[in-house]
Structure formats: C-alpha cells, structure tokens
C-alpha cells in the first residue's frame, strides 16, 4: 500500500496529523487523519514512516454503520499488539463497543475505505488470501462445476465449513 492510495481515497483532505508516539513503528512514525466532521460520517487514519514512506497501519471508521476496518503491516503486527499488551490498551477496540475488523488484503481495505468515503454500500465480508497449487485449483474448479457454483462460491463455502468446525471444537 502507498501513501498516495490513502491520500486519493480521502481526496487529499487532511484534518490533523501528529507524531505517532508508540515505539512499535519506530521513531519516524507519523499519523495523518481525515475526518468529515460528522459524528455519523467517517474518518480515516494512516501511520507511516516519514523517511522511508513505509505504511504501518491504515484505519477506516464508518460511524454511520458502526464499523471500523484496519490493515496493519504484517511485519509489525506482533510488535503493535505486544506494546498494546504492555501498555494495557485494547488495540482491538476502535471506539465504544466497536472493534476493528482486521483485514489481511490491502485491496479489501482500499475498496471498503473508498465506499465508506463515498457513503455507498459495500461488501462487509473479509477477503482472505489463500495459496493453492495449480492442481488444487483445477480440482476445486471441477468440484465447483459438479456443484454448479462458481469457484469463489465453493471456496467461500469450504472456508465457512472449516471455520464452523473449528468453532465447534473450541
């Protein structure tokens, strides 16, 4: 993800900025915010390195629908949560009773953020990266064909089944 991507989503409208004072992202971390000044509207935040321009974290807050989405640089996620535990801060909580939905796929955050900014409906499902061999994809395509569903529908169904089984065993 690039700073330019975030800036384009918020139409270059910055409402505030400050040094990011936690240690997990290093001494050159800086945070920018963009809020539309509406408590039923939206706000967006980005934390990045002022020297390298590496993006550490982006957040999208949809106050109207009481949803918050976040993408954290996978190389630093453990550091962030370790520091939050040390500081006794619940980094899962966005505000009040709203927790962040952590997204693994950058494009998923970009799509949701753009829709939130434009105040249009968006897909609340979370994209999950999966790594399949060509042979596995071929087998799944055959299974999908046999079930008369799309490959995406089959994968979604299989993932839901697996999640349900894991939940039952907990």
Image (spheres, helix red, strand yellow):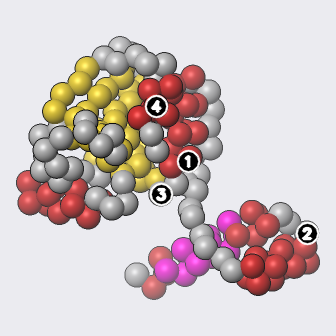
Measure the C-alpha gap from mark 4 to mark 2.
Answer: 41 Å
Depth check, mark 1 against mark 2: the one in front is 1
Q: What residue is pinned by disc 1?
A: 108
Q: What residue is pinned by disc 4?
A: 4
Disc 1 secondary structure class: helix
Q: Earlier in the sequence, mark 4 or mark 3?
A: 4
Q: Which mark is residue 104?
A: 3
User: Where's residue 45, x and y in %?
Assistant: 34, 33
Residue 97 lies left or right of residue 24; in this view the side is: right
Crowdedness near tag 1: few (<14), some (14–19) or many (≥20) residues, C-alpha within 10 Å? some
Residue 9 lies left or right of residue 32; in this view the side is: right
Measure the C-alpha gap from mark 1 to mark 2.
Answer: 27 Å
Measure the C-alpha gap from mark 4 to mark 3.
Answer: 19 Å
Residues in magenta, as a range:
156-166
Question: From this viewpoint, is residue 4 visible?
Answer: yes
Measure the C-alpha gap from mark 2 to mark 3.
Answer: 29 Å
User: Where's residue 5, x and y in %?
Assistant: 49, 34
Assess whether mark 1 and mark 3 are in contact (beta carbons under 8 angstroms): yes
Assess whether mark 2 and mark 4 are in contact (beta carbons under 8 angstroms): no
Q: Earlier in the sequence, mark 4 or mark 1?
A: 4
Depth check, mark 4 against mark 1: the one in front is 4
Q: Which mark is residue 148?
A: 2
Which quarter of the image is occupied by the C terminus?
A: bottom left
- Write the residue at 81% across / 83% down: 139
Q: Nearer the viewer, residue 103 or 122?
A: 103
């Amino acid at each position: 993800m690039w700073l330019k991507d975030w800036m384009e989503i918020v139409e270059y409208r910055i409402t505030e900025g400050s040094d990011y004072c936690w240690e997990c992202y290093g001494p050159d971390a800086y945070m920018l915010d963009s809020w539309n000044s509406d408590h039923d509207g939206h706000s967006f935040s980005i934390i990045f390195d002022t020297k390298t321009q590496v993006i550490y974290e982006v957040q999208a807050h949809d106050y109207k629908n009481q949803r918050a989405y976040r993408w954290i640089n996978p190389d630093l996620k453990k550091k962030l949560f370790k520091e939050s535990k040390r500081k006794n801060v619940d980094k899962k909580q966005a505000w009040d009773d709203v927790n962040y939905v952590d997204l693994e796929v950058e494009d998923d955050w970009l799509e949701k953020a753009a829709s939130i900014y434009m105040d249009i409906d968006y897909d609340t499902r979370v994209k999950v990266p999966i790594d399949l061999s060509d042979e596995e994809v071929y087998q799944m395509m055959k299974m999908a064909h046999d079930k008369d569903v799309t490959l995406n529908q089959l994968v979604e169904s299989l993932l839901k089944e697996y999640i349900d089984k894991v939940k039952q065993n907990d």
